[in-house]
Image (tube, helix red, strand yellow):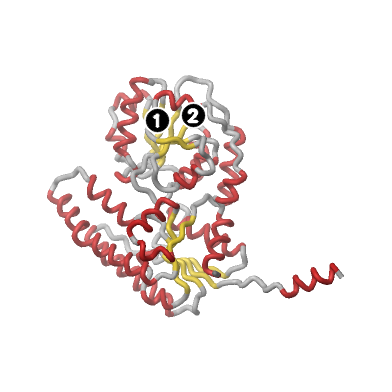
Amino acid sequence: MKNHSLQQESIEKPEKRHLRILIVTHAPLSPKFGAGQMAINLAEAFRDQGHAVTCWSPHPMQACTRWWAELRNWQFMRSKLDEFLKTQKSFDVIDCYPLLLTERVAESGCSIARSVQPDILYRLSEIQNSQNNGFKAIAFKAFNLFLILPYLSLLLLQSWRRANYILCLGSIELEWMKKWFPWWKGKLVSYNNALSHREQIQVAKIRSCRQRREGEGCRFLWIGRWTHHKGITELTEFIQKRIPLNPKDTFTIAGCGTYAEKQFSSRLLQSGNVKIISSFERNQIYSLLLNHDIGLFTSRVEGWGLVLNEMLESGMPVFATRAGGVTDLSTFCPDMIKLFPPKLEGVIDMLSCSTKTDMKDYYQTFSWLKIAEDYIKLVAS
């Protein structure tokens, strides 16, 4: 009788509904691009759950070297998306980069405005911190401040109004949105970022074999584009203050392009205290993580900062500013993340930090499988 009851219960349990989902990103669909990588990872997680997923991007696009053509580019991408939707059957869910969420998108399915970066704050940071005062630079600032910013702000406000849900990237952005747009509080939700499952396996191997370096000095690692919102001024000042007091320390600045080299004296570069790696292939990240002791994350404004996940999962402690995913990650790795800039004795304490941190709860939260599960619960509610 008991077995019969269990069998009856399983028969009456409704089948899981498989959704038809469209993921729209403004970036090329390639792991080389952060937004494209997130779209690919989210799509794979949805497919693993049995959902039918289409990833779409307006790329390839014509290269546009003139900065005043940006408005035309956004108009082009939006119209191209509308044309694409005309050729498709209806979707249950359309996950869309906010600046591309048109009226047609909102009419074509449950629309999700999913943030991948704080566009307006990025733009403001670059305008405020530009040091170039030539005529072209002043014209560029004025163009951004009085035309691009109002235009992008209008697009965002329209998109947030149309969307069924607004997905903020991390709790810091969620707090900011609730503060400035409290009338949309009912549709504001946060989600996390994560490495792909394949990358997590590779990075975990580094953590399992990481040992504290016996030599003198500490090997610091900073990864990112050389832009003001990444906190490059704070990073440069920290390096220049620390090296005279700790001449055995080394700093690797990777993925920064060619501009970073100009910020340091030839003496620091030739001595090896500062090493610039202008670019690197994705698979080279593993050797960078393995061959350094402590990570630096100095962003003033950040979408998430996936390099934080990479460093922490590799067993590397990090000195970080409160930006991007720092608050969310600190909950699971409190001993591995400390406030930037560190005090002199703080570095020694971090070097002795255990690399055998229990990551079970971390992986249960920061995985695309979990992110996708929470996402489906949201749209199905």
Residue 152 placement, left or right of 279:
left
Quarter holding the N terminus is: bottom right
Vertical order, 199 against 6 (above or below) = above
Q: Check disc 1 and report the residue beneath it.
A: 342
* Residue occupying image coordinates x 62% and y 67%: 50
* Residue occupying image coordinates x 31% and y 37%: 260
Residue 358 percent location from the top left of the image: 61, 39
Quarter holding the C terminus is: bottom right
Residue 155 placement, left or right of 349:
left
In the picture, residue 234 is in which quadrant? top left
Vertical order, 34 against 231 (above or below) = below
Residue 188 placement, left or right of 21:
left
Which of the pair 69/126 is nearer the observer?
Answer: 126
Residue 41 percent location from the top left of the image: 52, 57
* Residue occupying image coordinates x 42% and y 80%: 86
In the picture, residue 261 is in which quadrant? top left
- The mark nearer the N terminus, 1 or 2, is 1
User: Residue 323 got which mark?
Assistant: none
| Kind of residue indicated by mark 1 | Pro
Residues tagged 1 and 2 counted as in contact (Cβ below 8 A): yes
Which of the pair 180/296 is nearer the observer?
Answer: 180
Residue that protrudes farthest toward the right in the picture: 1
Q: CA distance from mark 1 to mark 2?
A: 10 Å
- Secondary structure beneath label 1: loop
Q: Check disc 2 and report the residue beneath it.
A: 350
